[in-house]
Amino acid sequence: MKYGIVMFPSKKLQDLVNSYRKRYDPHYALIPPHITLKHVFESSDDEIKTVSRKLNQLSKQHHPMKIHVSKVSTFQPVNNTIYFKVEPTPELEQLNKELYSELPGEEPEYSFVPHITIGQKLSNDEHSDIYGQLSMVGIDHEEVIDRFHLLYQLENGQWTVYETYRLGEE
């Protein structure tokens, strides 16, 4: 089965992101707005129990994290994804690093760029037009996230929460 690890922002930020995603993101109905901490990895039913115990241990070693969403950005020319940039922090980067070193799965293809996708799989013309519009939309949002989630993918492509881990709780 396929799994991934994410943080969900507040409902307020999710509502803002979804106001764009419903138009520009074909994955809108498959997963809520999120910050990916560890990309998709395969795991058996037995292995995921060990992964879950490890995540529980890791969550206790990290405290709730302040995130700052500062602007609209893009991954172009690599791909035509448009996103809200989440300013990297040492805490977020350390958690990401530990998830890759402590859990099964391959090393990430790209460096960790914390973000919340607002549009993807756009044509070049769509990307230019939409990015031009959205880059003029100012965003300056801060909040604290106190948990992360292990998700699994259903047969229809949707992602659902397998387990939630609260940061810093004994």
Image (cartoon, rainbow, N blue to C red):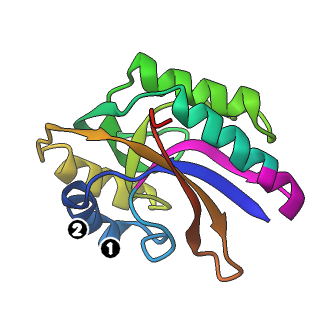
Residue highlighted by disc 2: 19
Left or right placement of residue 17 versus residue 109 in this view: left
**Highlighted range, magenta:** 34-49
Left or right placement of residue 129 versus residue 103 in this view: left
- Looking at the picture, does residue 84 appear above or below residue 15? above
- Residue furthest to the bottom in view is 156
> Circle 1: is it few (<14), some (14-19), or many (20+) Cα within 10 Å?
some
Depth check, front residue: 33 or 72: 33
Residue 47 position within the rendered picture, expressed as x and y whole percent measured from the top left: 86, 52
Task: State which quadrant residue 129 falls in.
Answer: bottom left
Q: Amino acid at mark 2?
A: Ser
Residue highlighted by disc 1: 22
In which quadrant is the N terminus drawn?
bottom right
Task: State which quadrant residue 125 falls in.
Answer: bottom left
Of helix, strand and loop, which one carries label 1?
A: helix
As drawn, the label of residue 164 is none
- Looking at the picture, does residue 159 appear above or below residue 88? below
* Residue lying at 58% horizontally and 59% vertically, measured from the top left: 163
Residue 146 position within the rendered picture, expressed as x and y whole percent measured from the top left: 37, 42
Depth check, front residue: 112 or 51: 51
The Cα atoms of the two marked residues, 1 and 2, are separated by 6 Å
